[in-house]
Image (cartoon, helix red, strand yellow):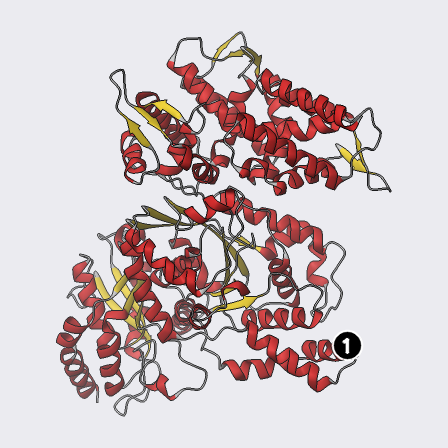
Amino acid sequence: MSTLTNRLKRISFRSVRWPVKALAKPSVLPANPVEDLQLDLQQPIYYVLSHYSATDLNLLEQECARLKMPLPLAPGNKTGYIFIHKKKHFWNKNSYYSRHHDKINTLLDRQILSDKINIQMVPVTVRWGRNPGKEKSLIRLFFSGTARSLGFIQKFFVLLFFGRASLVTFGKPIQLTPYLEHEGSKAHRVLTFARQLRIYFHNQKTASLGPNLYDRKQLIRELIETPQIEKAIKRHAEKKKISEAKARKLASSYAFEISGNYSYFVMRALEKLLGLILRKIYDGLIVSHGERLRELARDNELVYVPCHRSHMDYLLVSYVLFHQGLVPPHIAAGINLNFWPAGPILRKGGAFFLRRSFSGNKLYSAVFNEYLNTLFNRGYSMEYFPEGGRSRTGRLLAPKTGMLSMTLENVIRGRKKPLLFVPVYLGYDKIMEGNSYLGELRGGSKKSESIGQLLGARKTLKQDYGMVNVNFGEPICIASWLDKRQAEWREIPSDYEERPAWFPAEVKAFADHLMRGINSAAAVSPVTLVSLVVLATPRCAIDKQELLRQLNLYLEILREIPYSDSIVVPEGDAEAILGIAVGLNAVQIAKQQMGDIVFIGDESAVLMTYYRNNILHLFALPGLVASCFRYTRNMGRGKLLNYCAMIFPYLRNELFLHWNKSQFEAAVNKCIDFMLERDLLRIEDDILYRPEKQTHELREFILLSEILQNMLKRFSIVLTLLIGNSHCVNCFTRKELETNSQKLAERLAILYDINAPEAFDKNVFSSLVSILRERGAITTTEEGKLEMGEQVRILHTTILALLPYSVEQQLQQFMQVKDDLES
């Protein structure tokens, strides 16, 4: 029987060699396994597969030869393959293939006998297509996502239809050392090793394919029958004085409005179409830190939380994840996108829809919450935008906490796997919505999404939008977060009905933490870097050589004192970066005999503030240090640290800076040391001095200090209004302070700065007033009026010292006019 088995295996293997070579063109992850997985080619390498398959083994042999890796079928004892279990055949009734278990035991014995070798067990997963299949479907028999346990006819169809959609994933080498120390018999040791590998392959399948797809109608029926929805239906019927049948019908209509209808075949079609579009309009797609996800997705459930800059965000994240070998997530999309034909297509692509506001509709809220819980409980990954809408200013918006609250409730109810949030930063050289954003920044109204807009989007295919960066930040475990802050959360019963008292504050704190995680994964593009320099000049124009020096300084800052380990810095020098920006028409160059001038036209200046704001937080710290010397020749290090510490909480709140108080002080000291090395500061007798006059370093220093000038002006406006009305006790309500601040900022922008409404965004003033209240600088009386503390005067004096005297004069002039009008 053993001879017959080997003969049949050889025939099976040889019969599929040429079909595999002709039909299979797989994607491989990681693209360079030897380097990315740090494989030692001088040590033995054994490939571990889940099931024996001649098709899979041929494909693995083919790709190892292409990648110049050891071949699994090469003779000798330095390479080979094993599998964990095998499909039952009439010639082999054993579920586990004993010969390969013997090989595992042999390898373990080899590792014990010699400490000079390090046997590397590399798990390999082969996918033929990525269709998880429906929960009940005959099509799964022929179109499964894996060929691991298929019959000959099924393998033929899989190879024919999915040969060019195949995926080979190499995992990190598994160390044998833990199993050498395992107590028990050799057989028990092998079974332990095999069990761990079976868990690995099961989790790898879930990460790559996801759970079986649900039947939408069946899911909605089950959703409506849950105890939570039944209670909500009864409450709604009693409140509205209608029958329960009518309330149940309404709940069902809400579920149909909300729920997605994921289709693998539609997803594949969208992936092909989107690939063509991306290649047409973008010069390239840069994905960073994707390797983090492939490891984490096996043992955790992931929620992707990207920043929101463009409608392309939805598509890009799913496209990138698919090409990273992961199942695309279900996406929470605004109901404004549910128009024909985009709505049905997006729904098939994994989108589910939510209203902008639930407006006290508790039945809708209950249905949506339960739908979200259902997706989580079935193991589907999720994606939603914590900002709620697209940013029109380029800065991150204050997060909306609705989806986060629902997710946190799901965690409290209990989970099988840990839930990780993955911050995602999307950076564009140019955004497709640039013209519409420009209109909105100038005061135009936002246009509703419609089929007309969709048809008009074809014009974008004729333009060049440069590169796109998709950068995955450091994942955040929500359970670990709660353990550190509210350890008693694990004692809350899973069927609780009222949220604990600490719930709203922790959701807000976690939302801010997520936004800092997104900013920590920022990707710097040439356009953002050039705009940061040119917009810092009085007339948005700068000598080309001076611009190149400043760009090189900023590149040094990013590379030598990086904001975080996850940021992405553009390759090349200043000349290359400027060339890209010019090529994308972000800036223009005027030829002059005394030296070329780089400038931004009046039309583009407003839009360029959007790109500058994308990376403002990366330079906030060196900009703050430089600002402290803007109108002061020298200062002691201690005084400088005090100045920075006083302003830091307000910068942290607006820019979502990731440092805490102690980390910030260390970062300031590191920044000072960098400036000393770069001759941007010098030290004599423990006193820090800014550069001397008539030097390139002084000009670089001044441009660096300009980074935060607009933000500091906004701070000074709010503080001046508070100080200027101190003679009138309790003059302002919070709303009045925010409104007056916005009006004054708008007037100053029209008179003295770039008239970009991002400079007088009301949300920014609202955020600043909130942090003043949180820090006790202002308090609210029972009548709703604001009372000012001494901290406001100190902060006001400090910030005015960092601004030109002309700003103080402008503010005083405005306050005088205001007083005259009021009198």
- Furthest residue to the bottom? 90
For the image, the number of numbered tags is 1
Q: Residue at x 64, y 31 (%)?
A: 744
How packed mark 1 is, by other alpha carbons closer than 10 Å (few <14, some 14-19, many 20 or more), is few
Residue 589 seen: yes
- What residue is at 66 percent from the left and 64 percent from the top? 358
In the rendered structure, the answer to whether residue 182 lies left or right of residue 410 reads left
Residue 285 is situated, as x and y percent measured from the top left of the image, at 32, 51
Name above or below for residue 690 compared with residue 788. Answer: above
Q: Is residue 722 found left or right of 209 in the rendered image? A: right
Q: Quadrant of the N terminus?
A: bottom left
The residue nearer to you, when weighing 744 against 799, is: 744
- The answer to whether residue 661 of the structure is visible from this angle is no
Q: Is residue 10 above or below residue 166?
A: below
Query: Which quarter of the rendered picture does the C terminus lie within?
Result: top right
Position of residue 392 relative to residue 530, above or below, is: below
Residue farthest to the right, as pictured: 782
Amino acid on which the number 1 mark rests in the picture? Lys
Q: Nearer the viewer, residue 117 or 757?
A: 757
The picture places residue 288, in percent across and down from the top left corner, at 37, 49
Helix, strand or loop at disc 1?
Answer: helix
Image quadrant where residue 181 sits: bottom left
Q: Residue at x 31, y 34 (%)?
A: 577
Closer to the camera in the image, 528 or 47: 528
Q: Nearer the viewer, residue 59 or 693?
A: 693
At a point 73% along the width and 41% down the height, the residue shown is 735
Task: Report the side of 71 relative to 376 (left or right).
Answer: left
For residue 731, what is the image quadrant? top right
* Residue placed under numbered mark 1 in the picture: 240
- The x, y position of residue 294, in whole percent, is 40, 59
Asked where in the image residue 666 lies, by quadrant, the reply is top right
Position in image of residue 410 (x %, y %):
62, 66
